[in-house]
Amino acid sequence: MKTISKYLITGMLSAICGTTLAFDFGAMQNQIKGAQNQIKDAQNQIPKQIPQQAQPSAPQQLIQQLPVSPQAVNVIKEVSGPTQEEEVAIGRQIAGNLLGAVPLVKDDKLQQYVNNVGRWVASQSERPDLPWHFGVIESSDINAFAAPGGYIFVTTGLYRLMQNEADLAGVLGHEIGHVIQKHHLKILQQSKLVDAGGKALTTQVGNNDEVQKMIGSGAEIVARSLDKNAEFEADRIGVVLSARAGYDAYGLPGVLQQIGHSAKDAGSVALLFKTHPHPTDRLDKLSLAMGDRFDKVKGEDVAQRFYRAK
Amino acid sequence: MRALKVGGAALLWLLMFSAAMAAESGVALKADDIRKEPFGDAKSVGKLKLNDKVQILDKDGGWLQIKSSTAKGWVRMLSIRKGDAKKGGNEAAGLLAMSSGRSGTGKVVATTGIRGLNEEELKAAKFNAEEVKLAESYAASKAQAEQFAKEGKLVARKFEYLPEVK
């Protein structure tokens, strides 16, 4: 039991990176409950860096090591996730729904500009060849959204808080972080395991009923909170990708600082504050993680060509 | 006489400019060293105490050049809250203008009473094929983005991911 719990903890932590799990392991359920209670203690002992390569291997490890039913093995296999094609199909459905509620700003130059910055930042990540898409959407709300497969949107409210290209790079870098770590995809996989039992996805273009069933109603997935550690992780990735792209790494912290000054009760940050840790907490974590590592890594802020939203 | 006038105008402009710069103020969010250069290992030239009022003179990466009542030097950006001491309230717009050095542009970014995006709205959202196609039409290829970076004098460099600090 102790060994099983240990594997479960390691497997679940590296594969899911969260503490709330909803999928059904059948007979293993009780063991999971026991393991979940131990997760909090174990969290203090896990390696300081979330191992990127460990994700696909962890379920494999579980399959080899655990004496479980074939059904459970299938469930565990699901954790390794859909193909990239499926991932993009899921993201496209979410993007289309979000755009159904909040349309793009009708400014070609703005949209092209944001795609250039975003693609350049994403090129510094370990998934440079995803079909990345970026957009500015018409809302005074201060927020940004990432959907699987590389669909990323920033509201005009947030865009207008930015002072230069490095700020934009930092914000997009945070969202790119969610995509490369598959944070939303992991949430969906959990609900998929409950709702659809792991049916294969189709990747048909256009409104995709099967995918829609999986993502719930409309674009609600973008309003769902991620584990706060996923947000902190995306912050760290955002500054690093910015630095790799040649930008001043302090774009994202600067924007967070500004958002932190917004009144708590302002409608424009209500959803953001509801679904993310407070900017002050994010800055504290980020500041600790950044330390003096960036002191000698000066970058460009490219303020001259920053495209101001009309 | 004419030359004098031009000189006078230039002087006036200079004065106004420095007044605008001096108007950018901040408050210390925590105690920190004030350093001679914008580096963590630079010589300390003074101490910043919590809630010290400072003038912000310049920015360099994650560092701000400040002048406090006791010293002038560089402190980490995250140790300073830009703007006046008052807490809360809807000050984002004013702060924004100040941080850009363009105070007085009258740009308003956030006003109270805006009904933000909400979950019901997002839940009720219907797939918009036209918009998603439009979004996809703006995509930049990797090569285009590289060219764009080059034009902005951006040079890619290696940098390790940051470990999580508990």
Image (tube, coloured by chain):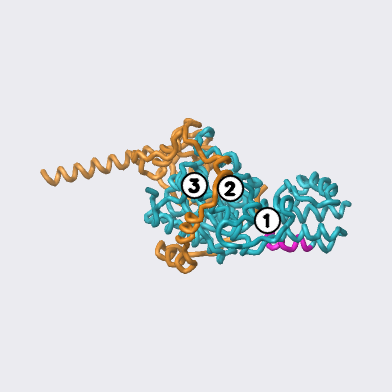
Q: Chain of mark 3?
A: A
Q: CA distance from mark 2 to mark 3?
A: 12 Å
Q: CA distance from mark 2 to mark 1?
A: 35 Å
- Residue A189, image x and y in percent? 69, 54
Q: Which sits in the foreground, A230 or A274?
A: A274
Q: Residue placed at 72% from the left, 56% from the top?
A: A15
Mark 2 vs mark 1, foreground winner is: 2
Chain coloured cyan in the rendered structure: A
Whether the residues at callouts 1 and 3 have beta carbons within 8 Å, the answer is no
The stretch of residues the image draws in magenta is: A50-60
Q: Is residue A172 left or right of residue B56?
A: right
- Which residue lies under the disc numbered 2? A218
Q: Amino acid at mark 3?
A: Val
Residue B44, above or below A125: above
Residue extending furthest toward the bottom = B143
Question: Which is nearer the eye, B36 or A197?
Answer: A197
- Identify residue for label 3: A102
Element under label 2? loop
**Residue at which label 1 appears:** A49
* Chain letter matching colour orange: B
Distance CA(mark 1)–CA(mark 3): 36 Å
